[in-house]
Image (cartoon, helix red, strand yellow):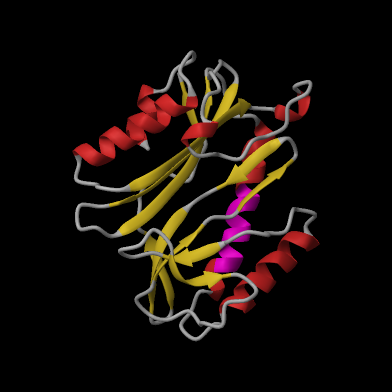
Amino acid sequence: MQAAFAALKPGMRDTEVAAAAQHYSQVHGSEQGIYLCASMPADAASAVGLKPSKFGQRHMQNRTIQKGDAVALLVEDSGPGGMYTELGRTCVVGMKVPQAMKEELEFVKESRKITLDLLKPGTPCKEVWDQFNAFMRKNGRPEEARLYCHGQGYDLVERPLVRSDEPWTIEKDMNIVVHPTYVHGGYLNWLCDNYLIGGNGPGPRLHQFPEIIVEVG
Protein backbone atom coordinates (compact mmCIF):
# COMPACT_ATOMS: atom_id res chain seq x y z
CA MET A 1 0.00 0.00 0.00
CA GLN A 2 2.79 2.42 0.87
CA ALA A 3 4.68 1.62 -2.34
CA ALA A 4 1.61 2.16 -4.51
CA PHE A 5 0.63 5.44 -2.86
CA ALA A 6 4.23 6.67 -3.07
CA ALA A 7 4.27 5.98 -6.81
CA LEU A 8 0.86 7.52 -7.48
CA LYS A 9 0.66 10.84 -9.33
CA PRO A 10 -1.75 12.59 -11.73
CA GLY A 11 -1.59 11.21 -15.25
CA MET A 12 -1.22 7.58 -14.18
CA ARG A 13 -3.98 5.12 -14.91
CA ASP A 14 -5.56 3.05 -12.16
CA THR A 15 -3.88 -0.05 -13.59
CA GLU A 16 -0.44 1.50 -13.05
CA VAL A 17 -1.16 2.03 -9.36
CA ALA A 18 -2.29 -1.58 -9.04
CA ALA A 19 0.86 -2.66 -10.90
CA ALA A 20 3.04 -0.80 -8.39
CA ALA A 21 1.40 -2.73 -5.55
CA GLN A 22 1.76 -6.02 -7.42
CA HIS A 23 5.43 -5.40 -8.23
CA TYR A 24 6.32 -4.60 -4.63
CA SER A 25 4.40 -7.63 -3.36
CA GLN A 26 6.02 -10.08 -5.74
CA VAL A 27 9.53 -8.72 -5.18
CA HIS A 28 8.97 -9.35 -1.46
CA GLY A 29 7.85 -12.95 -1.81
CA SER A 30 4.20 -12.93 -2.80
CA GLU A 31 3.19 -15.30 -5.57
CA GLN A 32 -0.48 -14.64 -6.26
CA GLY A 33 -3.20 -12.11 -5.58
CA ILE A 34 -5.61 -9.52 -6.89
CA TYR A 35 -5.03 -5.78 -6.97
CA LEU A 36 -8.23 -3.78 -7.32
CA CYS A 37 -8.16 -0.04 -7.93
CA ALA A 38 -10.58 2.75 -8.80
CA SER A 39 -10.09 6.49 -9.08
CA MET A 40 -12.93 9.01 -9.02
CA PRO A 41 -13.43 12.69 -8.20
CA ALA A 42 -13.04 12.99 -4.44
CA ASP A 43 -16.50 14.54 -4.27
CA ALA A 44 -18.24 12.58 -7.00
CA ALA A 45 -21.62 13.89 -5.88
CA SER A 46 -20.74 17.33 -7.25
CA ALA A 47 -19.22 16.07 -10.50
CA VAL A 48 -21.73 16.20 -13.33
CA GLY A 49 -22.56 12.77 -14.72
CA LEU A 50 -20.25 10.89 -12.34
CA LYS A 51 -20.95 8.62 -9.39
CA PRO A 52 -18.55 7.15 -6.83
CA SER A 53 -16.93 3.98 -8.15
CA LYS A 54 -16.15 0.72 -6.47
CA PHE A 55 -12.76 -0.72 -7.31
CA GLY A 56 -12.48 -3.16 -10.19
CA GLN A 57 -10.26 -5.77 -11.77
CA ARG A 58 -7.56 -4.90 -14.30
CA HIS A 59 -9.94 -4.57 -17.25
CA MET A 60 -11.82 -1.84 -15.32
CA GLN A 61 -8.70 0.16 -14.44
CA ASN A 62 -8.18 2.38 -17.50
CA ARG A 63 -9.22 5.72 -15.98
CA THR A 64 -6.54 8.42 -15.83
CA ILE A 65 -6.00 9.81 -12.34
CA GLN A 66 -6.34 13.58 -11.93
CA LYS A 67 -5.64 16.11 -9.21
CA GLY A 68 -8.67 16.21 -6.92
CA ASP A 69 -9.37 12.49 -7.26
CA ALA A 70 -9.84 9.87 -4.60
CA VAL A 71 -8.21 6.50 -5.31
CA ALA A 72 -9.33 3.28 -3.60
CA LEU A 73 -6.83 0.42 -3.63
CA LEU A 74 -7.25 -3.17 -2.46
CA VAL A 75 -4.16 -5.35 -2.12
CA GLU A 76 -5.28 -8.96 -1.59
CA ASP A 77 -2.34 -11.28 -1.96
CA SER A 78 -0.38 -14.12 -0.45
CA GLY A 79 2.64 -13.56 1.75
CA PRO A 80 5.96 -15.42 1.40
CA GLY A 81 4.50 -18.43 3.26
CA GLY A 82 1.50 -18.65 0.93
CA MET A 83 -1.08 -17.34 3.41
CA TYR A 84 -3.51 -14.69 2.17
CA THR A 85 -4.51 -11.42 3.80
CA GLU A 86 -5.84 -8.20 2.32
CA LEU A 87 -5.56 -4.49 2.97
CA GLY A 88 -7.74 -1.70 1.60
CA ARG A 89 -7.37 2.07 1.88
CA THR A 90 -8.21 5.28 0.01
CA CYS A 91 -6.01 8.27 -0.83
CA VAL A 92 -6.78 11.71 -2.23
CA VAL A 93 -4.55 13.30 -4.85
CA GLY A 94 -3.19 16.85 -4.60
CA MET A 95 -5.71 18.00 -1.99
CA LYS A 96 -6.71 17.80 1.64
CA VAL A 97 -9.16 15.11 2.70
CA PRO A 98 -12.67 16.64 2.69
CA GLN A 99 -14.15 16.90 6.17
CA ALA A 100 -17.25 14.94 5.17
CA MET A 101 -15.02 12.11 3.95
CA LYS A 102 -13.18 12.06 7.30
CA GLU A 103 -16.46 12.00 9.19
CA GLU A 104 -17.79 9.10 7.12
CA LEU A 105 -14.57 7.18 7.77
CA GLU A 106 -15.36 7.43 11.48
CA PHE A 107 -18.75 5.87 10.78
CA VAL A 108 -17.00 3.09 8.85
CA LYS A 109 -14.90 2.38 11.96
CA GLU A 110 -18.03 2.37 14.09
CA SER A 111 -19.78 -0.08 11.78
CA ARG A 112 -16.69 -2.28 11.79
CA LYS A 113 -16.62 -2.29 15.59
CA ILE A 114 -20.16 -3.68 15.56
CA THR A 115 -18.76 -6.58 13.57
CA LEU A 116 -15.58 -7.06 15.60
CA ASP A 117 -17.54 -7.21 18.85
CA LEU A 118 -19.47 -10.15 17.39
CA LEU A 119 -16.50 -12.09 15.98
CA LYS A 120 -16.14 -14.39 18.98
CA PRO A 121 -15.89 -18.18 18.99
CA GLY A 122 -19.35 -19.70 18.73
CA THR A 123 -21.09 -16.72 17.08
CA PRO A 124 -23.16 -17.75 14.03
CA CYS A 125 -22.08 -15.95 10.85
CA LYS A 126 -25.69 -15.12 10.05
CA GLU A 127 -25.96 -13.21 13.34
CA VAL A 128 -22.96 -11.07 12.39
CA TRP A 129 -24.53 -10.38 9.00
CA ASP A 130 -27.95 -9.53 10.44
CA GLN A 131 -26.67 -7.20 13.18
CA PHE A 132 -24.32 -5.35 10.85
CA ASN A 133 -27.07 -4.74 8.31
CA ALA A 134 -29.50 -3.70 11.05
CA PHE A 135 -26.95 -1.09 12.19
CA MET A 136 -26.47 0.18 8.64
CA ARG A 137 -30.21 0.33 8.02
CA LYS A 138 -30.83 2.18 11.30
CA ASN A 139 -28.26 4.80 10.34
CA GLY A 140 -29.45 5.35 6.77
CA ARG A 141 -26.52 3.62 5.07
CA PRO A 142 -26.70 0.97 2.34
CA GLU A 143 -27.04 -2.59 3.61
CA GLU A 144 -24.41 -5.13 2.61
CA ALA A 145 -25.51 -7.41 -0.21
CA ARG A 146 -22.23 -9.13 -1.06
CA LEU A 147 -19.70 -11.18 0.90
CA TYR A 148 -19.05 -8.94 3.90
CA CYS A 149 -16.41 -10.84 5.91
CA HIS A 150 -14.74 -14.16 5.20
CA GLY A 151 -11.94 -16.48 6.17
CA GLN A 152 -8.56 -16.56 4.46
CA GLY A 153 -5.68 -19.03 4.46
CA TYR A 154 -3.98 -20.77 1.56
CA ASP A 155 -6.98 -19.63 -0.50
CA LEU A 156 -7.93 -16.03 -1.15
CA VAL A 157 -11.46 -16.73 0.11
CA GLU A 158 -12.15 -19.50 2.60
CA ARG A 159 -15.13 -20.28 4.78
CA PRO A 160 -16.65 -19.13 6.98
CA LEU A 161 -18.54 -16.61 4.84
CA VAL A 162 -20.33 -13.87 6.74
CA ARG A 163 -23.63 -13.77 4.91
CA SER A 164 -27.21 -14.90 5.47
CA ASP A 165 -26.85 -18.50 4.23
CA GLU A 166 -23.65 -19.55 6.09
CA PRO A 167 -24.32 -22.24 8.75
CA TRP A 168 -20.82 -22.07 10.25
CA THR A 169 -19.87 -20.24 13.43
CA ILE A 170 -16.79 -18.12 14.14
CA GLU A 171 -14.05 -20.18 15.82
CA LYS A 172 -10.72 -19.55 17.51
CA ASP A 173 -7.63 -19.22 15.24
CA MET A 174 -9.62 -18.26 12.16
CA ASN A 175 -8.10 -15.54 9.98
CA ILE A 176 -11.04 -13.25 9.18
CA VAL A 177 -11.03 -10.21 6.92
CA VAL A 178 -13.54 -7.44 7.63
CA HIS A 179 -14.32 -4.92 4.89
CA PRO A 180 -17.30 -2.58 5.29
CA THR A 181 -17.64 -0.93 1.87
CA TYR A 182 -20.47 1.29 0.66
CA VAL A 183 -21.27 4.41 -1.34
CA HIS A 184 -22.85 7.24 0.64
CA GLY A 185 -22.77 11.04 0.59
CA GLY A 186 -20.92 11.19 -2.72
CA TYR A 187 -18.04 9.02 -1.53
CA LEU A 188 -16.84 5.42 -1.59
CA ASN A 189 -16.39 4.66 2.11
CA TRP A 190 -14.46 1.66 3.37
CA LEU A 191 -11.66 -0.01 5.31
CA CYS A 192 -10.28 -3.53 4.85
CA ASP A 193 -8.18 -5.43 7.42
CA ASN A 194 -7.54 -8.95 8.71
CA TYR A 195 -7.87 -10.20 12.26
CA LEU A 196 -6.92 -13.46 13.96
CA ILE A 197 -9.69 -14.73 16.21
CA GLY A 198 -8.59 -15.44 19.78
CA GLY A 199 -10.44 -17.11 22.61
CA ASN A 200 -12.35 -13.92 23.42
CA GLY A 201 -12.58 -12.43 19.94
CA PRO A 202 -10.31 -10.76 17.37
CA GLY A 203 -6.81 -9.60 18.19
CA PRO A 204 -5.19 -6.45 16.77
CA ARG A 205 -5.24 -5.70 13.05
CA LEU A 206 -2.65 -7.85 11.28
CA HIS A 207 -1.48 -4.91 9.18
CA GLN A 208 -0.29 -1.72 10.85
CA PHE A 209 -1.07 0.66 7.98
CA PRO A 210 -2.87 3.66 9.53
CA GLU A 211 -6.66 3.76 9.44
CA ILE A 212 -6.69 7.02 7.53
CA ILE A 213 -7.37 8.51 4.11
CA VAL A 214 -3.89 9.28 2.79
CA GLU A 215 -3.06 12.64 1.19
CA VAL A 216 -0.83 12.07 -1.86
CA GLY A 217 1.17 14.88 -3.48
Q: Residue at x 53, y 55 (%)?
A: 179
Q: How many labels were placed on the picture?
A: 0
- 138 horizontally vs 129: left or right: right
Residue 48 lies in magenta, yes or no?
no
Residue 112 lies in magenta, yes or no?
yes
Residue 89 seen in the figure: yes
Q: Residue at x 24, y 58 (%)?
A: 82
Dominant secondary structure of the residues highlighted in magenta in the image: helix
Q: Tell which residue pokes out farthest to the bottom in this image.
A: 122
Q: Tell which residue pokes out farthest to the top in this image.
A: 11
Residue 209 seen in the figure: no
Residue 99's spot in the image, x, y percent? Answer: 66, 33
Location of the C terminus by quadrant is top left
Q: Residue at x 25, y 52 (%)?
A: 79
Q: Quadrant of residue 152?
A: bottom left
Q: Nearer the viewer, residue 101 or 183?
A: 183
Residue 213's spot in the image, x, y percent? Answer: 52, 36
Point out the stretch of residues depicted in magenta.
Answer: 106-115
Residue 57's spot in the image, x, y percent? Answer: 49, 39
Location of the N terminus by quadrant is top left
Q: Nearer the viewer, residue 127 or 146?
A: 146
Residue 143's spot in the image, x, y percent? Answer: 72, 59
Q: Residue at x 52, y 17 (%)?
A: 94
Q: Is residue 34 above or below residue 65?
A: below
Q: Quadrant of residue 26?
A: top left
Q: Is residue 77 above or below residue 160?
A: above
- 38 horizontally vs 82: left or right: right
